[in-house]
Amino acid sequence: MDGNHQSEDILQSSYQYGASVVDQSSRSQQRQTFLFGFPLHNSLAPLLHAKLFEGLSVPWTYTAMESQDASRFMPSLKVPDVIGCAVTMPYKVAMMSVVDEVTAEARIIGAINTVFIRKGVDGGLRYIGTNTDCIGVREAFLQNYPDVLEHSTGRPGLVIGGGGACRSSIYALWKWLGVNEIYLVNRLESEIADVMQSLAAAGFGGELIHVSSVEMAEELDPPVLVIGTIPDFPPKEEGEILARNIVEKFMSSEKQGYVLEMCYHPKPKTEFFEIAVAAGWEVIYGTEAMIYQGVAQQVLWTELPLEKFNLEDAKKVIANIVGSPKP
């Protein structure tokens, strides 16, 4: 899979929801995008998108709209020069019901993080909710290790955690990264049950296995792709300690693979990151997934392919903030 072809697939598939709303002339005009959520003070998204727009030489802006009033969302989105928006907590689930349609990935994951606009057959604007978090996960692996599918296809994957990032990670592993089954490890069994039930109800067709003991981990074929989606806190409670022990058992496998550590705040080199490096795994910073999900948003908004974006400058800007190595 080639990253540029993937971005073209994102763009081309978006036209099933309506016709283009952007051309070269409109790209030279002032346009707005925004991030809707609360709280937003730690978000790196405005910095990332400003750098990406600068690299495209378009006079577009991306602002943080911090709000606890959900009723502000659609009126803000329908302002004439708004070309799309991003959605974050606590609105990723709630806003699925107010847009005109949601994409297949958003429906299965059960959340949107992006709204893009297309023109309907009646000439009216259609507001489409999608989820680019899963694309960020996919591209973090494919862009950093172009041959990763040769190693991951037909092999197990592992996702650590039970929240929204867990769901988008599961989708990426199943849909694009070739894994044949996905192990789930989490501090709370109830969260894993919720994840498995909601995905199945939404049409997810992959095999999910809740790994609930170190002994169970010992018996399983070791994973090739591992995604960490939990905060960087030392394990204290019984469930957290057990989850860490299970993960460490998988990390000690004789066959190492690739780890994506989604957590990068307050520092990108988390405890799990260091455990994986020490065990000999190839480890990808979570900022990579954050950057590529943002680029996917801009592909949908600007209707430009991936090769038009200056990713190196964007990566340097983010690295300067969070302290991850520069590309």
Image (spheres, rainbow, N blue to C red):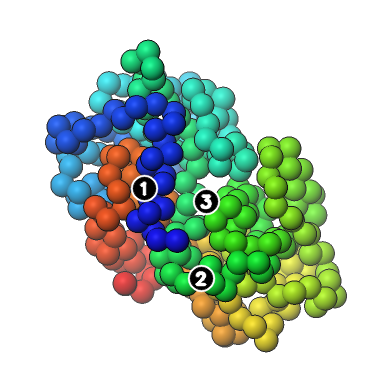
Tally of numbered tags: 3
Query: How busy is the neighbourhood of tag 2: few (under 14 within 10 Å), some, or many (20 plus)?
Result: some
| Residue position for label 2 | 148
Give the side of residue 224 with respect to residue 95, left or right. right
Mark number displayed over residue 134? 3
Q: Is residue 228 above or below residue 166?
A: below
Query: How busy is the neighbourhood of tag 3: few (under 14 within 10 Å), some, or many (20 plus)?
Result: many
Instruction: Tell me residue 225's x, y (percent).
Output: 60, 69
Which of the two discs, 3 and 1, labels the residue nearer the N terminus? Answer: 1
Inter-mark Cα distance, 3 to 2: 17 Å
| Residue position for label 1 | 8
Q: Is residue 231 visible?
A: no
Instruction: Tell me residue 235's x, y (percent).
Output: 69, 68
The residue located at (51%, 70%) in the rendering is 148
SS assignment at label 1: helix
Inter-mark Cα distance, 3 to 1: 16 Å
SS assignment at label 2: helix
Relative depth, front residue between 125 and 321: 125
Inter-mark Cα distance, 1 to 2: 20 Å
Query: How busy is the neighbourhood of tag 1: few (under 14 within 10 Å), some, or many (20 plus)?
Result: some
Q: Give the amino acid type for the residue marked by disc 3 in the picture.
A: Cys
Task: Give the mark toward the camera: 3 or 2.
Answer: 2
Q: Give the amino acid type for the residue marked by disc 1 in the picture.
A: Glu
Q: Give the amino acid type for the residue marked by disc 2 in the picture.
A: Val
Q: Are marks 3 and 1 in contact (CB under 8 Å)?
A: no
Q: Are marks 1 and 2 in contact (CB under 8 Å)?
A: no
Give the side of residue 23 with respect to residue 44, left or right. left
